Structures are given as C-alpha cells and as structure tokens.
Image (cartoon, rainbow, N blue to C red):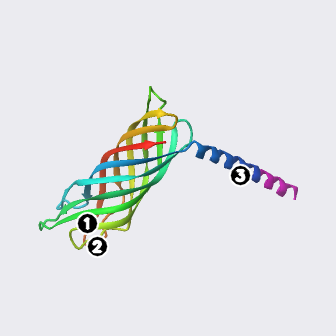
Amino acid sequence: MKKLNLLSIFLVIFQFSFSQEFSNKLKNARMGLYVSPAINFIQTDSDDIETNSKPGVVYGYALEIALNEFHRLESGFGITYKGGVITSPNNSTVDYKVQYLTVPIHIKMRSREIGYFNYFARIGPSLNIKLKEMISDNKTTNAGMIDISIFIGAEYSLGGKTSIECSLFFNNSITNALGSNNDPDALFHQIGVRTGFLF
C-alpha cells in the first residue's frame, strides 16, 4: 500500500512538472501567417506519358513551439493547390488542379542570431486531405496523400518574438495522387518560395 501511495505521489509530481514545462513552452510559442507561390509538377511511373508543370499556391497558419534554443516543432494548417498536366501516348490531355487541406508536422533547426537574422532548415511530413478537385476529364484523385517537405531560409527579427521569414521549399509527395485504376501511379510535387510573418 505504501508503494502504491509513493507511486501515486510520484505520478502527480511528474504530471505537474510536465504540465508546467508544457505551459512554459506554450507561452514561448509563436504563431503566424504565410503564403507560398509554387510551381506544381507531376512525376509518373510511365515513360510513355508526357507531363507539364503549372502554377500553384499554399497559404495558411503556422504554430511554432520551441523545444530548445535551436530546435522548434512547427504545425498548423494550410490550403494547398496542387496538380499538373498529363498527356498520354494517344495525345489525350488531362489538366489536374486539386485543393487540399494540409497539416504539417515539421522540425525547424535554427541558428543563433547573426545581426538581425536567424538561418534555418525545416523538414518533416505533411498530410494532405482533398477538399476539391477541378479536372478537365472524367478522372479523379485519391482522398489524401503524404508529402515530405524541405525548407531552407532566413528570419529577420522585428523585435521580441516577431519576425519576417522567407524560405525556398520542395514538397516531395511519397504516396500516389491519382485515384483511377486506369491511371498510372503519379506523384504531385511542388517547388516554391514561402514568405511569412511570425509573432
């Protein structure tokens, strides 16, 4: 019984300490908005198919929690427009434009402040859930897909926790985007520039 009481006391103390630590991290968290013009392109598993790129965009809300001085956990949500153009050997062309709700889980590795700048790399997966598709033929896409994203960029401090950031990014899809059994496997990729405001 004494052991059980000691274990209960230990768990209460641990939970209290963890709650305090998590609360402190939330106090130091930053939020922000961003927009990312991008170029969309498609990669297929067929050599007979021609693909073409088209413009896209990502915009959304970011939440950044400091894990330590140099590492941060970033999540949030965004609206992403992906797609591209596929031309089959019989010269039929399908233009894909798909809107997704994107939920990222990224780790941000951040340098010490140099002047007013911090330099960073950000990497991690994102879940993309289809909201709407606009396709030029009687085709469909899968309900969701997963990306691995890589960013390299810099922040300019405006004082305190407030900063402006700019980064180059590559969203590398790792799951098939197309839903029809008659379609080849295809990956929707993006490359672009992200600009944001954190506070």
The residue positioned 19% from the left and 58% from the top of the image is 51
User: Measured from the top left, where is residue 9 in percent x and y?
Assistant: 80, 52
Q: Amino acid at mark 3?
A: Gln
Please give left or right for residue 67 compared with residue 134 in the image.
right
Q: Are marks 1 and 2 in contact (CB under 8 Å)?
A: no
Image x and y of residue 103, in percent = 44, 57
Mark 3 or 1 closer to N-term? 3
Q: Nearer the viewer, residue 68 or 180?
A: 68
- The residue shown at (87%, 55%) is 2
Query: Which residue does the numbered mark 3 point to in the structure image?
Result: 15
* Residue that mark 2 sits on: 181
> Which residue is identified by label 1?
184
Q: Label 1 is placed on what type of residue?
A: Pro
Q: Residue at x 27, y 67 (%)?
A: 134
Q: Residues within 10 Å of mark 1 (few under 14, many from 20)?
A: some
| Numbered disc 3: secondary structure | helix
